[in-house]
Image: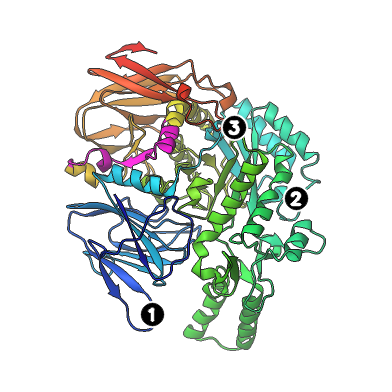
């Protein structure tokens, strides 16, 4: 059951697809606290009991249980995020409180929301939108999975990627020319490392200008796209939010002529600096501007491109033209002065505060639904609406074809139009653990097509970190190795253990019939592919405490290793399960372990997961790319004491006839007798 409560005059985000009449009754469970005079907002206050667990908030730091910290829903470009970081690239205002009562709460508000979950007061949850105008949805159900399902039905079906986009992707900032891309593909193929796509960062463009191609570095681009396609490789170019301010550049000239760019208060264009230098931001919240920008993707579609990633769309701002002038003026006053400790810190804060400055976000405006709205009031919608612009254009330009699309910034509602990767991260073991813990929270919020930069984006990775991250990443829908300019090269073939990496990646392809099937069922049935143990084992006290094991689909439990030099890990089994130890697509051992606590050896050259009792999964023979993978020639791997059934979903991977009953079939397994 879902109840809607409306406070003030909310800005409509279009996150919700169901129309509900606001309740006139008082909001249950929470007290509504008016804040101090002058703050112009209110807070929702919930007294948490000792046993309460708070799930959700999608892309955020810390654990699966969000208690004990202060979070902010504010799309934020911060690649060097740590435990102390309050906000990341997405703003996902949905939680489930699980304890003596169980309910969900969605705060539909496009500006900043502060979630004080036992931070100020250990047993108090305080939710504070920065304005008193918001819609709130209270969701009650039988259990956490039922509540998550109701929420997903409220906000709409999750984006479905083409089947090839579930293959392994290799990326780096940056592959500078076609020859470098060819070399990457050649090395993967010659070393037997499966690969389906190469992701192209900003250097494929002409001087970082959207919807252009660097003809010197990538000549005859359409022919190059076709050449890669013949090798089973899709090229996936980046699109950034900022449009370079340059006379004669058609995208800029059209945006200027039609008033499609975000404005300052005086009506002039807001100018900021990003990759190409000075840019203007298309007003993605303006219907006409959004449609114009989305149709620009046609240039690349026409050259054979079938996938895109949208970046820098929080939007990230290196500097604004106006604020940079102010900073230089202030720094000029400090020249030749002796700086004491306080003046030095002021100097440092001036410089470090140039990028993504709050003052800048409050200095430009959108034309949204006929109203002029200051950007910071709708900040969290920008990346969502940029991705929506592309998705809506694809529906018009290639209506019968799935196009890969994922974004860095997001808000709930964007999950209908594209996936997300979890943003720029670091080559830290803590970020591997954060990736593991994020997956259920993202799935709750509708983001199913998701994953992290495997091996870490920033800083120099280590060989063992790449191995451990791959061993987890083979289960995530986005499986992309991505690294930053100036860091250690981390393509799998560059390491001594490249044969081991090839074998681990091959396991992904053997598991793809299961992983794709589970993804599709989660998308079509508003379910969660990744879940905390407590969602399925509600009465198990130990399961409610586990923060580093996940259920993946209906049949398996994951127990990844996320600590350097670890030879294995402790595992809790909430029931008897079968351990599967895989070393390649066709090499594995199994062992049944009883319910309880175990220490499991897990070497760097293997992937370990568990099959739940009376469950099974289909395995393929593996392949070098999705196009070579046989999704029909399967065998079942299971743990069967009585009988197991597997509901197998498999479509053509390209069309949109998702609900065709011909795509569903039942596999049965009785003990070790298999019927396909």
Which residue matches tag 1?
39
* Camera-nearest residue between 419 and 487: 419
Which residue matches tag 3?
196
Find residue 212 and name its label.
2
Q: Where residue 95 sits in the image (x, y, percent)?
A: 33, 54
- Magenta extent: 518-540
Q: Taking 417 as reference, is 62 above or below it?
A: below
- Residue at the (42%, 56%) spot, across then down: 92
- Residue at the (50%, 46%) spot, across then down: 416
Q: Can residue 444 be spotted in the picture?
A: no
- Tag 1 and tag 3, C-beta contact below 8 Å: no
Q: Earlier in the sequence, mark 1 or mark 3?
A: 1
**Tag 3: Cα neighbours inside 10 Å, few (<14), some, or many (≥20)?**
many
Q: Where residue 288 sits in the image (x, y, percent)?
A: 66, 58
- Residue at the (42%, 46%) spot, across then down: 446
Mark in front: 3 vs 2: 2
């Amino acid at each position: 059951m879902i109840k809607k409560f409306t406070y003030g005059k909310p800005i409509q985000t279009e996150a919700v697809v169901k129309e509900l009449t606001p309740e006139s009754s008082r909001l249950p469970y929470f007290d509504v606290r008016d804040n101090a005079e002058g703050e112009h907002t209110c807070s929702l206050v919930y007294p948490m009991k000792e046993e309460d667990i708070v799930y959700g908030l999608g892309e955020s730091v810390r654990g699966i249980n969000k208690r004990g910290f202060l979070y902010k829903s504010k799309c934020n470009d911060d690649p060097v995020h740590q435990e102390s970081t309050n906000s990341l690239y997405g703003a996902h205002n949905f939680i489930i409180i699980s304890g003596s009562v169980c309910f969900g709460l969605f705060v539909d508000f496009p500006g900043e929301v502060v979630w004080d979950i036992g931070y100020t007061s250990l047993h108090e949850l305080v939710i504070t939108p920065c304005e008193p105008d918001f819609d709130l949805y209270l969701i009650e159900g039988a259990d956490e999975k039922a509540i998550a399902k109701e929420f997903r039905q409220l906000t709409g079906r999750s984006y479905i990627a083409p089947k090839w986009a579930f293959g392994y992707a290799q990326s780096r900032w940056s592959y500078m020319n076609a020859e470098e891309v060819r070399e990457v593909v050649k090395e993967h193929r010659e070393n037997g490392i499966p690969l389906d796509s190469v992701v192209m960062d900003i250097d494929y463009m002409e001087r970082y200008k959207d919807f252009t191609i660097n003809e010197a570095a990538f000549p005859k681009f359409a022919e190059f796209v076709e050449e890669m396609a013949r090798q089973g490789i899709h090229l996936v170019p980046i699109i950034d939010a900022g449009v370079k301010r340059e006379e004669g550049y058609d995208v800029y000239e059209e945006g200027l002529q039609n008033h499609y760019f975000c404005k300052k208060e005086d009506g002039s264009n807001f100018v900021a600096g990003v990759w190409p230098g000075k840019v203007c931001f298309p007003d993605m919240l303006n219907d006409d501007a959004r449609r114009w920008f989305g149709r620009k993707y046609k240039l690349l579609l026409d050259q054979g491109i079938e996938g895109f990633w949208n970046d820098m769309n929080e939007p990230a701002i290196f500097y604004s033209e106006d604020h940079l002038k102010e900073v230089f003026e202030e720094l000029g006053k400090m020249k030749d002065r002796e700086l004491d400790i306080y003046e030095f810190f002021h100097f440092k804060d001036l410089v470090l505060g140039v990028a993504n400055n709050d003052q800048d976000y409050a200095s430009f405006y959108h034309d949204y639904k006929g109203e002029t709205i200051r950007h910071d009031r709708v900040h969290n919608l920008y990346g969502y609406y940029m991705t929506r612009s592309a998705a809506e254009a694809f529906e018009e330009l290639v209506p019968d074809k799935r196009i890969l699309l994922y974004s860095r910034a997001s808000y709930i509602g964007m999950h209908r139009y594209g996936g997300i990767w979890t943003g720029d991260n670091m080559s830290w073991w803590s970020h591997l653990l954060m990736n593991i813990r994020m997956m259920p929270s993202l799935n709750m919020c509708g983001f199913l097509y998701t994953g992290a930069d495997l091996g870490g984006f920033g800083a120099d990775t280590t060989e063992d970190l790449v191995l451990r991250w791959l061993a987890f990443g083979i289960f995530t829908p986005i499986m992309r190795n991505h690294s930053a300019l100036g860091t250690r090269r981390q393509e799998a073939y560059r390491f001594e253990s490249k044969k081991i990496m090839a074998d681990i990646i091959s396991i992904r392809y053997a598991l793809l019939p299961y992983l794709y099937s589970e993804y599709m069922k989660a998308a079509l049935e508003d379910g969660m592919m990744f879940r905390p143990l407590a969602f399925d084992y509600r009465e198990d006290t130990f399961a409610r405490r586990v923060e580093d094991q996940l259920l993946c689909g209906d049949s398996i439990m994951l127990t990844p290793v996320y600590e350097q030099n670890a030879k294995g890990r402790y595992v809790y089994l909430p029931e008897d399960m079968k351990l599967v130890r895989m070393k390649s697509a066709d090499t594995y051992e199994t062992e049944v372990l009883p319910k309880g606590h175990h220490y499991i050896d897990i070497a760097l050259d293997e992937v370990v997961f568990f099959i739940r009792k009376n469950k099974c999964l289909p395995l393929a023979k593996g392949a070098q790319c999705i196009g070579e993978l046989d999704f029909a020639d399967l065998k079942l791997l299971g743990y069967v004491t009585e009988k197991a059934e597997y509901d197998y979903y498999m479509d053509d991977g390209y069309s949109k006839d998702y609900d065709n009953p011909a795509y569903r079939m039942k596999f049965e397994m009785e003990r070790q007798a298999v019927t396909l």
